[in-house]
Each structure stands twice: as C-alpha cells, then as structure tokens.
C-alpha cells in the first residue's frame, strides 16, 4: 500500500488518518511504528470485517450516516 511506504519514508509525521472503503488488499505492517494510524471506513460492514486484522497497524472507526 503506497500509504505505508510513504509513512516509512517520511517518519516525521506523528499521525495519519486513512479514509477508505476497505476494498484494497491488506497492507503490510509499516517499519515506521512511530506514526500512529487511524483507519476511517465509509461503511460499518467494512469496518466490522477489517478492524480486527488492522489492529496491529492502528485504530479503526467508521462514519455513521446521518439520518435524513
């Protein structure tokens, strides 16, 4: 995943928020463990499927759609 490569090459960041649909392949664990990562999913179903496997890389949340 290009984001993990970027974090490895630019270690000065203390955090990153990755907004995703969760359809990309599972990223590798970054070498840079200093930068904290939050995975922000656009759907609850994808969050529920991915938050466990992503735990070694960072925290996860989803955006709940506002009632109309």
Image: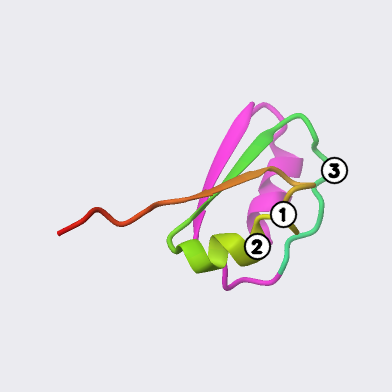
Note whether 39 is above or below 1 in the view shown.
above
Element assignment for label 1: loop
Q: Relative to 55, does residue 41 appear above or below in the rendering?
A: below
Quadrant of res 23: bottom right
Q: Position of residue 45 (x, y in %)?
A: 51, 68
Q: CA distance from mark 1 to mark 2?
A: 6 Å
Assess disc 3: are there few (<14), some (14-19) or many (≥20) residues with their C-alpha within 10 Å of its C-alpha. few
Give the magenta range.
1-25
Which residue in the protein does label 3 denote? 31
In front: label 2 or label 3: 2
Q: Nearer the viewer, residue 49 or 56?
A: 49
Disc nearer the start of the sequence (2/3): 3
Q: Dots 1 and 2: beta carbons under 8 Å?
A: yes
The residue shown at (69%, 36%) is 10
Q: Residue at x 72, y 54 (%)?
A: 54
Q: Label 1, on which residue?
A: 54
Q: Position of residue 43 (x, y in %)?
A: 44, 64
Residue 50's disc is 2
Camera-side residue: 54 or 31? Answer: 54
* Secondary element type, mark 2: helix
Q: Mark 1 or mark 3, which has the lower sequence index?
A: 3
Magenta stretch encompasses residue 13: yes
């Amino acid at each position: 995943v290009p984001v993990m490569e970027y974090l490895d090459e630019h270690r000065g960041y203390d955090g990153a928020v990755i907004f995703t649909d969760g359809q990309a392949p599972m990223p590798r664990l970054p070498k840079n463990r200093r930068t904290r990562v939050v995975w922000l999913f656009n759907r609850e179903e994808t969050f529920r499927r991915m938050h466990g496997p992503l735990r070694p890389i960072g925290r996860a949340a989803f955006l709940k759609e506002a009632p109309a």
